[in-house]
Amino acid sequence: MSETVADPSKLAHLAMFYSGTDDYLDGVLGFLRAGLTDEQPAFVAVPGHRLGMIRDGLNGQADRVAFADMSEMGRNPAWIIPKVAAFLDAHAGRAVRYVGEPIWAARTQEEIREATRHEALINLAFAGRAAAILCPYDTARLDATTLADAEYTHPTLVSGGAERASAAYRGAALYPESCDRPLPPVPAHAASLVYRDDLAAVRALAAGHARRGGLDGDRADELVFLVNELATNTLHHTSGPGTLHVWLTREEIVVQVRDGGHIADPLAGRCRPPAGAGHGHGLWVAHQLGDLVELRSGPSGTTIRVHVGVPEPLTP
């Protein structure tokens, strides 16, 4: 695994296909050791059950590596890019290595789609950065579509320690077809509201569902805030009106905002807006406070669906 990462001044984004623990450790540890030999800062974010084996495999070098549990850091895939960007910024001017495993078999299909979108956006978010990024994919447990999508979102593929260019890769921020499939229909039992100017009713509808979902005071306030921010976007950036839907499932509160606007920036909401920016804050808030955000935008309008987990299972 040397050719693609030989030039530390450029971004290298690799999908590593593995089957079994030994194959996994061979690839991850080899990648990390090569960077540590060159005094490169390293960051590992993988599902928690894998952290111990990586630390053990690094022996005395583990204290030179930053670790995070991806099931927490990347529960919402939109949280990952800001965390990785912060690590790169903390080591500005140096080549870094990052192992990120945002996709694993226990993820829901909605989470896998958004994590796949995240993988595509890495190529755009970190273009020109001095970073080598390795993303492990479990060929024994992930389905064929997910593995094919990995080839679409990574310029370089690694299997058995051998690198090859991905014939399926089409460029930065181009998504596989699976990422932009229409969202499932809003359920018939969802509450709905058309809003044009006064957002008091929007906040009240969100607050009522927060109570029904059993959210505590702070989390309920966060839900109301994120819904208000998304509805405010409609008023500020479109000619209106917007439509809000809210519903409960057994495990979450789902809110959806639909309006006639078009979001052209694929990184909107996934990178912190610059200080003083007049736009982007609503999407940033939704991505940071939601447990999962699904966004579909095109010439006919934009739909943003935010999932917020509840503390106890519900009877919808």
Image: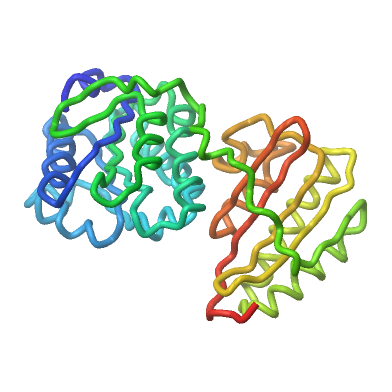
15 horizontally vs 59: left or right: right
Depth check: give the residue in front, 90 or 242: 242
308 horizontally vs 148: left or right: right
The residue under the point 74% across, 37% down is 278
The residue under the point 58% across, 69% down is 252
The residue under the point 13% across, 34% down is 160
Relative to 111, say whether 155 is above or below: above
Q: What colour scheme has been applied to the protein in the rendered image?
A: rainbow
Q: Position of residue 245 (x, y in %)?
A: 76, 60
Q: Position of residue 149 (x, y in %)?
A: 41, 35
Q: Position of residue 121 (x, y in %)?
A: 48, 33
> Could you tell me how many numbered marks the image carries?
0
Relative to 245, say whether 178 is above or below: above
Depth check: give the residue in front, 27 or 218: 27
Q: Position of residue 67 (x, y in %)?
A: 27, 53
Q: Most extreme residue toward the right, as rendered?
A: 197
89 horizontally vs 175: left or right: left
Query: Where the C terminus falls, by quadrant?
Result: bottom right
Relative to 152, say whether 201 is above or below: below
Depth check: give the residue in front, 287 or 314: 314
Query: Where the N terminus falls, by quadrant?
Result: top left
The residue under the point 74% across, 51% down is 230
Q: Most extreme residue toward the left, as rendered?
A: 59
Depth check: give the residue in front, 222 or 22: 22
Would you identify the image quadrant in which residue 5 lies? top left
